[in-house]
Image (cartoon, helix red, strand yellow):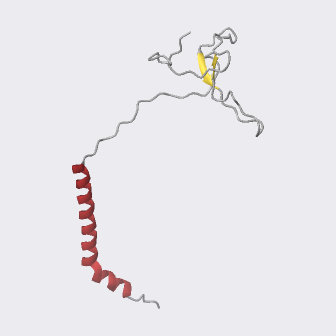
Amino acid sequence: MTWRWFNGSETATYTNWFLNQPDDRSYNGNSADCAYIMVLERRRSHEKNYYSGTWLDRACTIPMAYICEQPSLSFIEVGPGAIAGIIIAVLALCGAIIAALLFFRPQLYRHSRTRSVTK
């Protein structure tokens, strides 16, 4: 028996089948053509689930949780020139903020020192 990804693109090279698996046992007339990973918690702290993480075969008609294959993300390569450009832009922005604060400083100071008039 050859196991393939659902889309048929490649055969599985790594296996971790549970003892005597795959057995291609029939489930309500459906052959066991799909695989699943058994995940169980320990029942007692001193027991070890030696079969947790192993594979079993099942009929594809039995609802199970699943994983999906997606294309890998691609990242944009950033060279030294781009990093230098970002640094220059950040410094220019900081300089503009400092210049604005120095320019508006008298007005900001005057505004904070005015008293509110209450009747």
Out of 102 and 70, give the one closest to the viewer: 70
Out of 42 and 102, give the one closest to the viewer: 42
Image quarter in which the N terminus is found: top right
Q: Where does the image place residue 105, in percent across and percent down from the top left?
A: 29, 80
Decide: is 64 above or below 79.
above
Q: Where does the image place residue 7, in percent across and percent down from the top left?
A: 47, 18
Decide: is 101 above or below 52.
below
Decide: is 84 above or below 11.
below
Q: Is residue 77 left or right of residue 52?
A: left
Q: Where does the image place residue 29, in percent across and percent down from the top left?
A: 68, 8
Q: Quadrant of residue 44?
A: top right
Question: How many marks overall?
Answer: 0
Q: Residue at x 63, y 14 (%)?
A: 22
Q: Residue at x 23, y 59 (%)?
A: 88
Q: Is residue 17 left or right of residue 87?
A: right
Q: Residue at x 54, y 29 (%)?
A: 67
Q: Where does the image place residue 31, in percent across and percent down from the top left?
A: 63, 10
The residue most toward the bottom is 119
Q: Quadrant of residue 90?
A: bottom left
Out of 29 and 3, give the one closest to the viewer: 3
Q: Is residue 74 left or right of residue 100?
A: right
Q: Quadrant of residue 99?
A: bottom left
